[in-house]
Image (cartoon, rainbow, N blue to C red):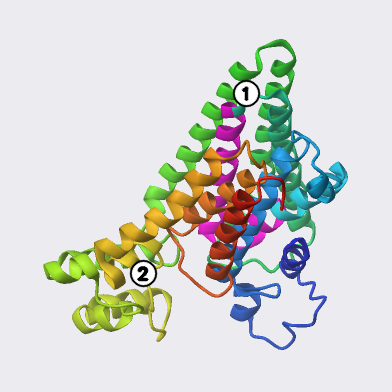
């Protein structure tokens, strides 16, 4: 995954090591990324893989050595830091707003986990990850200015807005202050302070998006409004069981063609909107309330099961974090081949950990 991330970062600065984008028109060069393709596909794959890696970074040095897991524990700190740098760099430059918001959610989940463990080693690890993030953001801010002629950011993304040095300088100063406080104050108190600060920052970003909501995410707000209206207008039978698997487009275009065409004319030209770009809304239309609740139960029960059994195998924590943050991402995303199979694979790996309490 780190190789895929690295190629994605290179592509954002017109470096094409695999020669995959030669001859492509401008829109494709800015909206296709790495070996995955569409930035929405890339974003889903990226956030699942990086979330699992980030969770692995948090628990790795705080776990008792187990022979079957020794290969995991032998990863050096410099290798983890390299992974974090490349991962944070691709989150900041990939171009999908859902990737940015779920990246923020990942950091918030990491803070919550650190508070829940009350373990100083994990607290220090979370703080170090924030320092790495701030330094990565600062580095990209300066690099994007010096090589502005070759940067390849998507025009409709927030990349240029977030790569401002002042943001990352403030974050770096705040995290360093918390690190100083950690030496003098109780670990739990400092972590609660960090969690409060992180939550305020995250809510601040979401609040500021309210004024941009109709334009945010390529018109997703308009699409969600029409989709919700489509569900409310359904007969009771369809509200319970939906219009049928993968029937979003046939149902919505048959009844709301005017609204759907209006959304397309502003954002996607003559394309067809095949899904709601929101996992739960899409399932409400296709599988109804019953299917939507079954899906939530499936993913939610896996997350709860892995978290409850974290003391049996600490590697369940990265899998739980990966699933949770991916579901946050899917509030503005959709199922695709570069994400859905990996989600079910992660759940299968977690269950295999539970079946083999001694290791992998």
| Structural distance between the alpha carbons of marks 2 and 1 | 40 Å
Residue beneath the point at 32% across and 61% down: 292
Residue 5 at x, y = what percent? 72, 63
* Whether residue 227 is situated above or below residue 205 in the rendered picture: below
Snapshot quadrant of residue 253? bottom left
Mark 2 and mark 1 lie on one chain; the one further toward the N terminus is 1
Which residue bears the numbered disc 2?
A: 276
Residue 20 at x, y = what percent? 74, 83
Residue 145 at x, y = what percent? 74, 56
User: How many numbered marks does the figure carry?
Assistant: 2
Label 1 crowd bin: few (<14), some (14–19), many (20+), radius 10 Å: some
Which residue bears the numbered disc 1?
A: 118
Q: Quadrant of the N terminus?
A: bottom right
Snapshot quadrant of residue 36? bottom right
* 110 drawn magenta: yes
Highlighted magenta segment, given as a residue range = 88-116
Residue 324 at x, y = what percent? 51, 49
Q: Main secondary structure of the magenta part?
A: helix
Question: Which of the two residues, 291 or 168, is positioned nearer the viewer here?
Answer: 291
Viewer-nearest of discs 2 and 1? 1
Question: Which of the two residues, 279 or 227, is positioned nearer the viewer here?
Answer: 279
């Amino acid at each position: 995954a780190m190789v895929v991330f690295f190629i994605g970062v290179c592509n954002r600065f017109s470096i094409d090591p695999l020669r995959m984008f030669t001859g492509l028109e401008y829109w494709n060069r800015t909206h296709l990324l790495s070996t995955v393709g569409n930035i929405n596909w890339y974003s889903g794959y990226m956030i699942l893989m990086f979330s699992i890696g980030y969770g692995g970074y948090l628990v790795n040095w705080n776990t008792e050595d187990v022979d079957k897991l020794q290969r995991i524990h032998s990863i050096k700190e410099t290798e983890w830091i390299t992974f974090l740098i490349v991962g944070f760099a691709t989150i900041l430059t990939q171009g999908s707003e859902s990737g940015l918001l779920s990246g923020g959610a990942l950091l918030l989940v990491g803070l919550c986990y650190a508070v829940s463990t009350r373990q100083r080693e994990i607290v220090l690890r979370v703080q170090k990850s924030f320092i790495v993030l701030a330094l990565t953001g600062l580095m990209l801010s300066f690099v994007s200015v010096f090589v502005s002629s070759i940067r390849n950011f998507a025009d409709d993304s927030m990349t240029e807005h977030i790569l401002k040095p002042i943001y990352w300088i403030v974050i770096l100063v705040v995290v360093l202050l918390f690190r100083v406080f950690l030496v003098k104050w109780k670990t739990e108190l400092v972590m609660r302070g960090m969690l409060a600060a992180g939550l305020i920052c995250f809510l601040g970003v979401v609040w500021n998006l309210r004024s941009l909501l109709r334009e945010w995410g390529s018109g997703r707000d308009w699409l969600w409004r029409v989709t919700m209206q489509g569900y409310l207008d359904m007969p009771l039978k369809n509200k319970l069981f939906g219009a049928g698997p993968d029937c979003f487009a046939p149902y919505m275009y048959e009844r709301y063609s005017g609204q759907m065409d209006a959304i397309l004319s502003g954002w996607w030209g003559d394309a067809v909107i095949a899904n709601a770009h929101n996992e739960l809304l899409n399932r409400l239309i296709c599988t109804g309330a019953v299917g939507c609740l079954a899906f939530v139960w499936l993913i939610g029960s896996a997350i709860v099961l892995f978290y409850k059994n974290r003391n049996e195998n600490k590697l369940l924590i990265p899998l739980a974090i990966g699933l949770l943050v991916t579901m946050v991402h899917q509030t503005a995303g959709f199922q695709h081949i570069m994400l859905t199979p990996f989600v079910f694979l992660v759940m299968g790996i977690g269950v295999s950990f539970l079946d083999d309490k001694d290791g992998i």
